[in-house]
Image (cartoon, grey):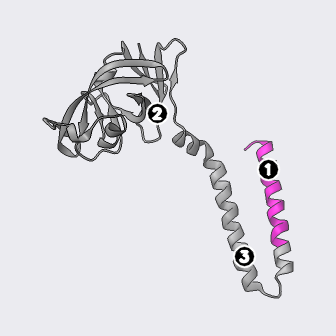
Amino acid sequence: MSGIELGHLAYLGLLGGALALWLLVEGRKNMGRTVKQASAWVLIFVGVIAAIGLWGDIRRTVLLHHDVAQDGSQITLPRAPDGHYYLTALVNGTPVRFVVDTGASQVVLTPTDAENAGIALADLVYSGRANTANGSVRIAPVRLDSIDVDGVQMRNIRASVNEGQMKTSLLGMTYLERFSRIEIAGGALVLHR
């Protein structure tokens, strides 16, 4: 622990001690109520300290973002705390959150994401099957006009809509194979054009 951190800790200790002394003096007539109130304040204080200490992790989880090189030559995705790589792309102009999945043979949309991207679910023909971790599910082949990641746009991409339960759409090989190289290094997935 550095000197600055020790100073902050000492300051917080003095502040807490002064608050405890004030509560004791003010509440000496009704000690039960004072103890309850003091306990509530201690819990609030501990909660705030925990939130401050975990803020970096919270921010990384909530605000995962990808970086695109200025010339569009590469897309860098940070590893999420759950070990996956996520990417938000515009599918037919609509934002869709994907998990990048090199084990998926194609781009697979959830029914909700497909509908948001302008695909009429009522017109789909579930003519294929896919084997997933949750078993076999029916899929409907579709073509996406475009997938755009911060100006890096790819057109006419084969995809499917999954009839089963999926939390997040999958960005599979029908998109990823359009890159010249896929690299995992330093906690990031890098897609090179």
Secondary structure category for the residue under label 3: helix
> Which picture quadrant has residue 116?
top left
N-term mark: 3 or 1: 1
The span from disc 3 to disc 1 (Cα, nearest Å) is 25 Å
* Numbered marks: total: 3
- Residue pointed to by mark 1: 8
Q: Dividing the image into 4 quarters, which one contains the C terminus?
A: top left
Amino acid of disc 3: Gln
Q: Nearer the viewer, residue 165 or 94?
A: 94
Q: Nearer the viewer, mark 2 or mark 1?
A: 2
The span from disc 2 to disc 1 (Cα, nearest Å) is 33 Å
Amino acid of disc 2: Arg
Left or right: 102 as drawn, with respect to 54: left
Amino acid of disc 1: His
Q: Dividing the image into 4 quarters, which one contains the N terminus?
A: top right
- Residue pointed to by mark 3: 37
Q: Is residue 146 above or below residue 32?
A: above
The span from disc 3 to disc 2 (Cα, nearest Å) is 43 Å
Whether residues under marks 3 and 1 lie with C-beta atoms below 8 angstroms apart, the answer is: no
Q: Is residue 35 above or below residue 185?
A: below
- Segment colored magenta: 1-21
Whether residue 9 is in magenta: the answer is: yes
Q: Nearer the viewer, residue 90 or 25?
A: 90
Q: Position of residue 132 (x, y in %)?
A: 22, 40
Residue plotted at (67% across, 61% down): 46
User: Dot 2, how many residues are within 10 Å of its Cα: few (below 14), some (14-19), or many (20+)?
Assistant: many
Left or right: 48 as drawn, with respect to 164: right
Secondary structure category for the residue under label 1: helix
Q: Position of residue 150 (x, y in %)?
A: 49, 23
Prevailing SS of the magenta stretch = helix
N-term mark: 3 or 2: 3
User: Dot 3, how many residues are within 10 Å of its Cα: few (below 14), some (14-19), or many (20+)?
Assistant: some
